Amino acid sequence: MAEESIAKPFYTVLILAFICSALVAGAAVGLRPQQDANRDLDRKKHILYAAGLYDKNRTVEEMFAPIETEVVELATGKYVTDGTIRPETYKQLKAALSDETGRQLSSAEDRAKLRRLEKYSLVYLVKDGAKVQQLVLPVRGKGLWSTMFAYVALDGDLTTIRGISFYEHGETPGLGGEVENAGWQDGWRGKRVYDDGGKIGLNIVKGKAATEEPAKHFQIDGLSGATITTKGVNNLMEFWFGEHGFKPFFSAQKIVEPGSSGRG
């Protein structure tokens, strides 16, 4: 009897733990579709923020309607049109981890400290009828504590920034965390990524950006007390707008006047 009384509480706890685990697992599985839907909604919101199209008085789906999602092969800059990769199901970060759809970056290549790079990227085309008005591009790179994720919207000249939205990071609040500050992000609008020679001229500086020509077109205010985060933002922009990022894609496009870009 003594042994039975000692074992009974143990089995009771074991059964309760099993039941609780089953309930938690069931809730996680049951809520996954809603969680995925919420992540998709948040992703669309930040694309709209970057493009300057977000309006709290309209639904996200309504605002997102003029935006077309495509897949681009980074090495060639060409659209993937054979149906082998579908934009609605393509998981870009997961693809980077696969030897089939991603690759290891060498230390010389890995300016943004990504370690691995996917072979294909999603791009978002903001369209007015058949015309592409903006391109919104996903970028990421290492800051002080975390990988920072953002969307950058470019005008039809493929160099003028319409906007940027940092939507995920683990940087220090009040310092590097200011990458998500709307006021700081507003300072990106109208800046240029490339100079007249086609080199990356954009630069987040220490202190205030220049106000004189031509530097004012390329400089963005630094983040006070966040030197490493600032360097990380510079590095990720240099990577994604360089030869291993979207530059081959830009080269494959027809360069036209801002606001009237056409899909190449």
Image (spheres, helix red, strand yellow):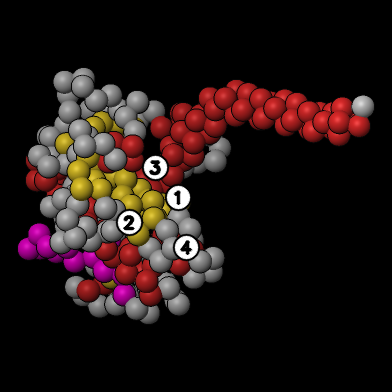
Q: Nearer the viewer, residue 37 or 18?
A: 18
Please give the residue where the numbered disc 3 appears in the rendered image.
47
Please give the residue where the numbered disc 1 appears in the rendered image.
167
Q: Is residue 195 magenta?
A: yes
Distance (Cα) linking label 3 and label 4: 21 Å
Q: Decide if residue 82 is on the left or right side of residue 15.
A: left
Residue occupying the point 7% across, 63% down = 197
Give yes or no for contact between labels 2 and 3 (Cβ–Cβ under 8 Å).
Answer: no
- Which amino acid type is marked by label 1? Tyr
Q: Position of residue 177 (x, y in %)?
A: 49, 63
Give yes or no for contact between labels 4 and 1 (Cβ–Cβ under 8 Å).
Answer: no
Q: Decide if residue 182 is on the left or right side of residue 237.
A: right
Which image quadrant: the C terminus? Answer: top left
Q: Residues within 10 Å of mark 1 (few under 14, many from 20)?
A: some
Residue occupying the point 26% across, 36% down = 98
Give residue 171's mark.
Answer: 4
Task: Relative to 198, say whether 40 is above or below.
Answer: above
Q: Is residue 92 magenta?
A: no
Distance (Cα) linking label 2 and label 4: 12 Å
Task: Relative to 31, say whether 204 is above or below.
Answer: below
- Which amino acid type is marked by label 3? Ile
- Between disc 4 and disc 1, the foreground one is 4
Give residue 141's mark.
Answer: 2
- Between disc 2 and disc 1, the foreground one is 2
Please provide the residue range marked out in magenta.
191-205
Is residue 30 visible in this depiction of the protein? yes
